Amino acid sequence: MTSPLVFITGASSGIGQALAARFHRGGYRLALVARRAAEVQAWAQSQGFASDTYAVYAADVRDIAAIVGVGRACIDSQGVPDVVIGAPSYREDDSNPLCTAAPGTSCQPTGESSLMRTETVPSCTTNIESPAAP
């Protein structure tokens, strides 16, 4: 039986990277998405992750077409994810159209996020789980 697959955006640092480590320890295969894919690859290798337990996809969560593209690439190469986690990072130097707050204060979404859009995949149901689940 194949291990479950988790698709995580924002995997190059912060909560996305922490969740990747936690799910990997829980026996999940990883689909890691980040703008800085080379950094994610280096991090996964430094953690000793076996190459057959993860894949890294380069995309910016603000680019809907890119996220749809890596989602399709993930399905084609790893299968349909069992868990999808949108954990985009926010850095002060980023231009984040979804954040109305000043750096260092709370951020409230404004408008439509690429993470709120969904694309229907025939015969596919994705389960959303708590990070505490594994």
Image (spheres, rainbow, N blue to C red):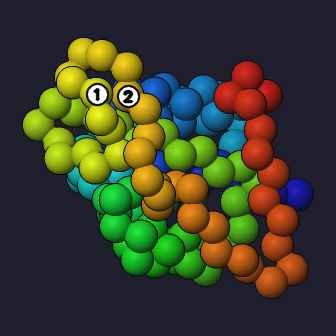
Secondary structure category for the residue under label 2 = loop
According to the image, label 1 marks what residue?
101
Q: Residue at x 84, y 65 (%)?
A: 125
Residue that extends furthest to the left in the rendered view of this protein: 93
Secondary structure category for the residue under label 1 = loop
Quarter assignment of residue 103: top left
- Where is residue 107 shown, x and y percent of the image? 38, 28
- Where is residue 81 shown, x and y percent of the image? 70, 60
Label 1 to label 2, Cα distance in Å?
5 Å
Q: Mark 1 is on which residue type?
A: Ala
- Where is residue 52 shown, x and y percent of the image? 57, 57
The disc at residue 107 is 2
Tell me if label 1 and label 2 are in contact, CB under 8 Å. Answer: yes
Question: Above or below — where is 2 with respect to 97?
Answer: below
Of the image marks 1 and 2, the number of the one nearer the N terminus: 1
Residue that extends furthest to the bottom in the rendered view of this protein: 122
From where the camera sits, is residue 68 visible? yes
- Where is residue 57 shown, x and y percent of the image? 40, 62
Q: Of 89 and 30, which appears nearest the observer?
A: 89
Q: Of 131 and 112, which appears nearest the observer?
A: 112
The quadrant the N terminus occupies is bottom right
Q: Residue at x 53, y 36 (%)?
A: 20
